[in-house]
Image (cartoon, helix red, strand yellow):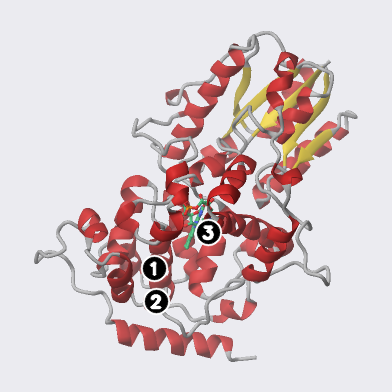
């Protein structure tokens, strides 16, 4: 009999909850990864760098497992048919996974659970991608928080060494199944292509975290940790990172708490999973949804240099600085009155660190429709934001080199007019009650 540990967004062998429990199950452990065609077949961009990142990581995991006399069992298919095949091929004692909070994953795991349980095989699932999830941080009245500051206070009051402790998987590596499988399919065989550009380093950037509080708001300094892609795919352990944050920077720890906050929002308020505003009255906003303006925003040609710099940074690199994410998102929803869901979907296509909960949370925050959002009558002024956070214009110059030339477009809307239009439109929608 074997135990299977199925990796999904937890692509590492160190400090990994499901793997730890699998290795302690007493049976040889087969580590499984599925390139999920349910997701991959829908990607328009066959040079999607996230697929390249996963492929690269999976190949490294295979090498690491081979060094322990084992191998990675890899499929390129849909999960349910793979599991049907595994049930035929192996005598499976147990299956271990980590929780995944997105709707698609919840449905996928429920279907696999039903299948396994029909054969009396238990599926064990663990918290791994955040410090606290679901009902672990509730208000005194037992209610979920929808405002960040009290949530973060309660989070900090609850956290202790127990929650931040690593799972010592390496002590049990001799439990890996000994043998080999058929290998990792090439990207080309899955109809994807590699660009070969580097990804953010996997090492926790201690020096950056030490100076994070002073520098993080200035996009030209590139002074944020770039851990987001690693947290997204689990190539870095959140427990290890949170321990470093606790030691080095309360400001940085607070950002990690935002991440937990949005995971639990998703769990407690599932209506946001289906395209709804967190505050339902915001679904009454009469969006203008001008397609040409949306296109200009996507391409970074709005005539607002900070907005354009951000969009171009994301289009070229798959990353955008957090402050600029706030500015570009607010600009779309408020200045252009384009449904924030269009922007959310565009970010979902482009961001290497795309994560439903943080992205949806960020968009609804900027659009004013979310939990803990700024009030609707507060509209970011992109020119003032640029003055404050890119005072020498270095970030803008880097991404919009033609800023001073004639072919740089005029502003797509005048700020004051757009601000008033946004406030009036929002007021009409939210004041109906
Ligand atoms: P750092 O500033 O070094 O922060 C460290 C880590 O804290 C990040 O890696 C991230 O995991 C977490 N974090 C920081 N800020 C937030 C936040 N506001 N919400 C949740 N977690 C946070 N983050 C994503 O990971 N995926 C997304 O799809 C995403 N979409 C966003 C969309 C909008 C409109 C906005 C305003 C923010 C979005 N964010 C998203 C949050 C934030 O912008 C990124 O996490 C951050 O820019 C990633 O860079 P970093 O790793 O250098 O962050």
Q: Is residue 424 above or below residue 212?
A: below
Q: Are marks 2 and 3 in contact (CB under 8 Å)?
A: no
Relative vertical location of residue 141 with respect to residue 173 in this rendering, above or below:
below
- Whether residue 296 appears in this view of the structure is no
Between the residue at mark 3 and the residue at mark 1, the CA separation in whole angstroms equals: 21 Å
The picture quadrant where one finds residue 399 is: bottom left
Marks 2/3: CA–CA distance: 23 Å
Q: Earlier in the sequence, mark 3 or mark 1?
A: 3
Q: What residue is drawn where x is 69% and y is 36%? A: 166
- As helix, strand or loop, the secondary structure at mark 3 comes to helix
Q: Judge left or right: residue 424 versus residue 11.
A: left
Q: Position of residue 63 (x, y in %)?
A: 54, 16
The residue pinned by badge 1 equals 327
Q: Locate residue 207, reporting x and y percent.
A: 43, 44
Could you say where residue 256 lies in the image, as x and y percent from the top left? Answer: 58, 54
**Are the two marked residues, 1 and 2, in contact with CB atoms closer than 8 angstroms?**
yes
Find numbered disc 1 in the image and state the secondary structure of the residue it sits on.
Answer: helix
Q: Which residue is mark 2?
A: 380
Residue 183 in sight in this render: yes
The quadrant in which residue 300 appears is: bottom left
Closer to the camera, 294 or 144?
144
Q: Residue at x 68, y 70 (%)?
A: 150
**Mark 2 burial class by Cα count in 10 Å: few <14, some 14-19, many 20+:** some
Quadrant where the N terminus is found in the figure: top right
Number of other residues with Cα within 10 Å of mark 3, as a class: few under 14, some 14 to 19, many 20 or more: some
User: From the viewer's perspective, is 230 left or right of 418?
Assistant: right
Residue at image location 38% in from the left, 30% down from the top: 193
Residue that badge 3 annotates: 251
């Amino acid at each position: 009999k074997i135990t299977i540990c199925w990796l999904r967004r937890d692509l590492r062998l160190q400090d990994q909850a499901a793997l730890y429990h699998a290795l302690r199950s007493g049976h040889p452990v087969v580590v499984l990864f599925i390139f999920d065609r349910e997701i991959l077949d829908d990607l328009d961009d066959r040079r999607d760098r996230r697929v390249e990142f996963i492929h690269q990581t999976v190949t490294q995991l295979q090498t690491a497992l081979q060094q322990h006399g084992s191998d990675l069992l890899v499929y390129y298919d849909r999960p349910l048919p793979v599991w049907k095949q595994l049930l035929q091929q192996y005598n499976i004692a147990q299956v271990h996974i980590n929780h995944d909070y997105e709707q698609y994953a919840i449905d996928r795991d429920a279907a696999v659970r039903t299948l396994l349980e029909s054969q009396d095989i238990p599926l064990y699932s663990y918290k791994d991608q955040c410090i606290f999830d679901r009902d672990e941080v509730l208000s005194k009245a037992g209610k979920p928080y929808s405002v960040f500051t009290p949530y973060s206070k309660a989070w900090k009051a609850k956290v202790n060494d127990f929650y931040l402790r690593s799972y010592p998987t390496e002590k049990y590596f001799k439990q890996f199944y000994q043998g080999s499988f058929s290998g990792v399919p090439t990207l080309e065989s899955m109809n994807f292509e590699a660009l070969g550009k580097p990804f953010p380093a996997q090492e926790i950037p201690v020096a950056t975290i030490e100076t994070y509080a002073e520098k993080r708001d200035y996009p030209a300094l590139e002074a944020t940790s770039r851990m987001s892609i690693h947290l997204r795919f689990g190539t870095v352990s959140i427990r290890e990172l949170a321990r470093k944050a606790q030691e080095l920077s309360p400001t940085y720890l607070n950002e990690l708490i935002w991440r937990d906050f949005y995971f639990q929002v998703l769990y407690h308020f599932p209506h946001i999973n289906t395209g709804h505003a967190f505050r339902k009255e915001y679904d009454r906003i009469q969006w203008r949804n001008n397609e040409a303006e949306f296109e200009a925003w996507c391409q970074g040609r709005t005539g607002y240099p900070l907005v354009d710099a951000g969009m171009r940074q994301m289009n070229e690199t798959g990353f955008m600085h957090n402050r600029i994410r706030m500015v570009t998102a607010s600009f779309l929803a408020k200045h252009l009155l384009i449904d924030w869901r269009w922007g959310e979907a565009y970010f979902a296509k482009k961001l290497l660190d795309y994560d439903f909960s943080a992205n949806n949370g960020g968009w609804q925050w900027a659009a004013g429709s979310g939990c803990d959002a700024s009030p609707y009558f507060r509209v970011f002024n992109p020119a003032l934001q640029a003055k404050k956070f890119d005072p020498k214009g270095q970030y803008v110059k880097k991404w919009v080199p033609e800023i001073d030339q004639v072919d740089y477009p005029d502003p797509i809307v005048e700020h004051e007019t757009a601000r008033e239009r946004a406030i009036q439109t929002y007021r009409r929608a939210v004041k109906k009650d």
